[in-house]
């Protein structure tokens, strides 16, 4: 069976980019022998993957006509008129020319709304924009609630399968969009860093880390884009609490692209005289990020969104504590987390001292988290999920082809 893998995310998209990157690795390693995989790229950011893997791919570049088509397809009456004369979208014609049986949108791409004749599956991100639509990023043209709803509503009507990262997202999908539960499958995010680390353990990560000039303190790492819902402000409040309590052996490292709040966060750090507690990186290579994971005390994620996130699973793999918004994660994951009240910065200090004062108990929790990762969040399991979906579709397709 020929499967088209549609990819349109970029490095600046953060976690989903790394998820897609490792999805490519998994598909190539475990499923390329059973299926003919054709990658459909709208981004140049995956050139490294194209070169290393020697993938079979086509590029679908945006132009005036494709943008016009995107606009037309937003309106049902225009779409019907357009299809009457042109029958199929530019993207769908490309797919048909290449004899694709099933299309996989690896992220919530608006391009799925251009598909009328080809069956597809799609990976959707968190549904929490419906509950948190007051954040500025959900007012932005490209990320707005309306745009997300438009994509999700189309997907829930027409997708063969919908993949989501967490059980809570599956519940929200059925609650807000009346999705058929049988067509929604939980597929945890795939990880890139553990795979790189396993293949490159001989790398001198200490040398890489030294070049980053991070002080010799207990490091809290927050690898996240600077969106408002990521709640970097809470970490500044936490640092202020540490400072007021005269605790100077902690240090916070941010890394992520600026989306909304970076300049605001930088201004507050200076205004509150917190420079001695922070270092901000715009972008880190995989190797640099691994070096910090190996050396840090903990990950900290006070986000308003994220029933599961990639850094959570990475912390399990690297056996690092992760301070996480209480009651946010899927229930089965919460025993591995250090949950914090994001209304109270002092909750971080309380949990910090619990860990310091109970190292044996903490190590047991970290070992359990790693065991969970090894059993559940590994490449073979991810591949089996894809294999199950592809085989299910292949069986059905045999009714007519």
Image: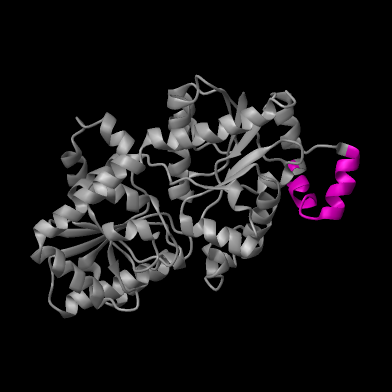
Observer-nearest residue: 150 or 164?
164
178 is higher (above) or lower (below) than 295: below
* Quadrant, the C terminus: top right
Find residue 285 and report its image quarter.
top left
Q: Position of residue 255 (x, y in %)?
A: 34, 55
The answer to whether residue 51 is seen in the rendering is: yes
Q: Which residues are magenta?
A: 66-85
Instruction: Please say whether residue 184 is one of the residues in the magenta stretch.
Output: no
In the image, what residue occupies the spot 30% across and 78% down? 344
- Position of residue 250 in the picture relative to residue 113 (left or right): left
Residue name at image x 45 percent, y 67 percent: 229
Query: Which is more toward the observer, 120 or 5?
Result: 120
* Location of residue 223 with respect to 146 vertically, above or below: above
Q: How is the image coloured?
A: one colour
Q: Is residue 16 left or right of residue 192?
A: right
Q: Quadrant of the N terminus?
A: top right
Q: x, y (%) of residue 84?
A: 90, 41
Front residue of this view, candidates 149 and 204: 149
Q: Main secondary structure of the magenta part?
A: helix
**Quarter where residue 196 is shown:** top left
**Relative side of 216 to 159, left or right:** left
Furthest residue toward top: 33
Seen in the picture, residue 250 relative to 110 is either above or below; the reply is: below
User: Would you place residue 146 above or below residue 65 in this image?
Assistant: below
For the question of whether residue 223 can be seen, the reply is no
Q: Is residue 67 magenta?
A: yes
For the image, the number of numbered tags is 0
x, y percentage for residue 389? 56, 36
């Amino acid at each position: 069976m020929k499967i088209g893998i549609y990819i349109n995310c970029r490095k600046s998209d953060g976690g989903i980019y790394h998820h897609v990157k490792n999805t490519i690795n998994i598909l190539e390693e475990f499923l390329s022998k059973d299926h003919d995989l054709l990658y459909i790229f709208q981004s140049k950011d995956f050139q490294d993957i194209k070169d290393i893997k020697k993938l079979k791919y086509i590029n679908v570049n945006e132009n005036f006509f494709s943008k016009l088509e995107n606009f037309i397809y937003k309106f049902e009456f225009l779409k019907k008129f357009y299809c009457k004369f042109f029958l199929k979208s530019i993207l769908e014609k490309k797919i048909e020319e290449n004899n694709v049986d099933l299309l996989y949108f690896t992220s919530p791409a608006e391009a799925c709304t251009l598909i009328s004749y080809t069956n597809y599956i799609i990976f959707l991100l968190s549904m929490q924009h419906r509950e948190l639509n007051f954040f500025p990023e959900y007012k932005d043209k490209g990320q707005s609630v309306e745009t997300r709803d438009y994509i999700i509503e189309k997907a829930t009507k027409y997708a063969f399968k919908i993949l989501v990262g967490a059980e809570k997202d599956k519940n929200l999908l059925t609650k807000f969009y009346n999705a058929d539960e049988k067509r929604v499958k939980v597929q945890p995010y795939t990880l890139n860093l553990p795979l790189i680390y396993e293949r490159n353990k001989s790398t001198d990560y200490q040398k890489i880390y030294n070049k980053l000039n991070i002080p010799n303190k207990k490091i809290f790492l927050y690898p996240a884009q600077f969106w408002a819902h990521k709640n970097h402000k809470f970490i500044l409040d936490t640092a202020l609490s540490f400072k007021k309590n005269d605790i100077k052996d902690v240090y916070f490292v941010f890394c992520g692209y600026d989306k909304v709040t970076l300049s605001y966060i930088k201004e507050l750090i200076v205004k509150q005289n917190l420079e001695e507690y922070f270092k901000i990186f715009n972008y880190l290579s995989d190797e640099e990020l691994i070096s910090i994971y190996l050396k840090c005390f903990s990950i900290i994620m006070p986000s308003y969104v994220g029933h599961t996130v990639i850094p959570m699973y990475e912390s399990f793999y690297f056996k690092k504590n992760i301070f996480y918004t209480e009651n946010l994660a899927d229930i089965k994951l919460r025993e591995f987390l250090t949950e914090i009240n994001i209304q109270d910065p002092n909750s971080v200090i309380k949990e910090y001292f619990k860990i310091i004062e109970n190292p044996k108990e903490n190590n047991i929790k970290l070992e359990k988290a790693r065991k969970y990762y090894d059993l559940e969040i590994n490449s073979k399991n991810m591949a089996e999920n894809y294999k199950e979906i592809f085989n299910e579709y292949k069986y059905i397709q045999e009714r007519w082809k």
